[in-house]
Image: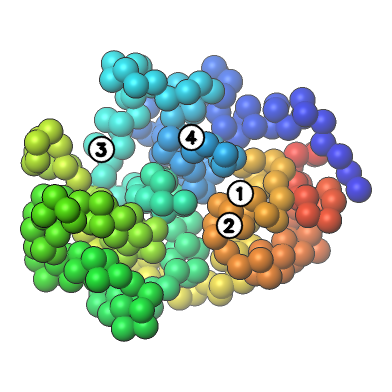
Amino acid sequence: MASVDDIVLSNFRSRTYRLLSEDQVKSPEQAVQFVNERGFIFFWPVKDFDLPSLWTAVAGDRPVPNEHDDPGHITWGWKDSMLDKRRWYYGKLLRRRASLVSLDIIPYFYTLSDRVGDLDDYMLLYEEGRLTFEEKSIAEALLKFGALNTIELRQKAQLSASSAKSRFERALAALQSGLWVLPVGVAEAGAWRYSFIYELFDRWYPQVISKAREITRQEAYRKLSSLYLDSVGVSTTKEIRRLFRWKKNAIERALEDLFAESSIIRLGEDHWASSGLLA
């Protein structure tokens, strides 16, 4: 069994998280390059989950401040300006938190989703009791009326009552994590004159469907597990399961396959490391 020194791991993550001053992200184009390099990251750091984020790559390893004039919040403007450019995927994917995914990698997530590649396939899950009424209503509204800002979407989905706000927000987050819908722009709407515009995922990224069909589920498990370890250096089967919400046997098989290929290192019964960590 190999072991990893804390300093070795810290130095590894300093590189993959872009924490060193000379590696920090300084422009939208560099942000796209960073996402393509890592495959997938969080937009903000998420407590208790190890994964690079755009915030730390720009602002350094420090808490996200409440002050709106903090220089690190330039990431917010970058994200908004890129929503309609189709340079990456942005949405509440991992743990239903804001995530950024390379367009080369999003098909692997699609392969592991409940999607079958039809605009109205949400009805299959609804009929099986795996989609809520609110989720179905939002998807139906987008299918019928096209892209809508948040205010319009609540109205068209008949969820505009104040009592329905929390149910709408939960449903919207669930639909994003399932790759049914995603934000594609910003509108001057609502009390703050700021509102996301949402669209059906398949209408926005139709090419993802054909690419996903060429990827087996086991290939997707292996690819995403490998990318994750290449970002964080060291993790456990349990932590991988917590992040992706995959079934344990699927993760274990993927990790054993990667180990057999010498793509990752076994540190213990449940501990794994990127092969690049000890190189």
Assess whether mark 1 and mark 3 are in contact (beta carbons under 8 angstroms).
Answer: no
Tag shown at residue 25 = none
**In the current view of this chain or complex, which residue is farthest to the front?**
163
Quarter residue 44 falls in? top left
Q: How far across and how far down the image is residue 268, in percent?
A: 85, 51
Residue at the image position 49 percent from the left and 74 percent from the top: 214
Residue at the image position 16 percent from the left and 42 percent from the top: 195
Q: Give the residue type that dot 3 points to.
A: Asp
Quarter residue 200 falls in? bottom left
Q: Give the residue type that dot 4 points to.
A: Pro
* Foreground of the two, 150 or 159: 159
Mark 1 to mark 2 CA distance (whole Å): 6 Å
Tag shown at residue 224 = 2
Whether residue 122 sits left or right of residue 233 in the image: it is left
Assess whether mark 3 and mark 2 are in contact (beta carbons under 8 angstroms).
Answer: no
Residue at the image position 28 percent from the left and 20 percent from the top: 68
Chain-order first, disc 4 or disc 2: 4
Chain-order first, disc 2 or disc 3: 3
Quarter residue 52 falls in? top right
- The local secondary structure at tag 2 comes to helix
Tag shown at residue 80 = 3
Task: Give the foreground label among 3 and 4.
Answer: 4
Q: Which residue position is annotated with label 4?
A: 45
Tag shown at residue 228 = 1
Chain-order first, disc 3 or disc 1: 3
User: From the image, which quarter does the C terminus lie in?
Assistant: top right
Q: What number of labels is visible?
A: 4
Q: Give the residue type that dot 2 points to.
A: Leu
Number of other residues with Cα within 10 Å of mark 1, as a class: few under 14, some 14 to 19, many 20 or more: many
Q: How far across and how far down the image is residue 111, in percent?
A: 48, 70
Q: How far across and how far down the image is residue 201, in percent?
A: 29, 62
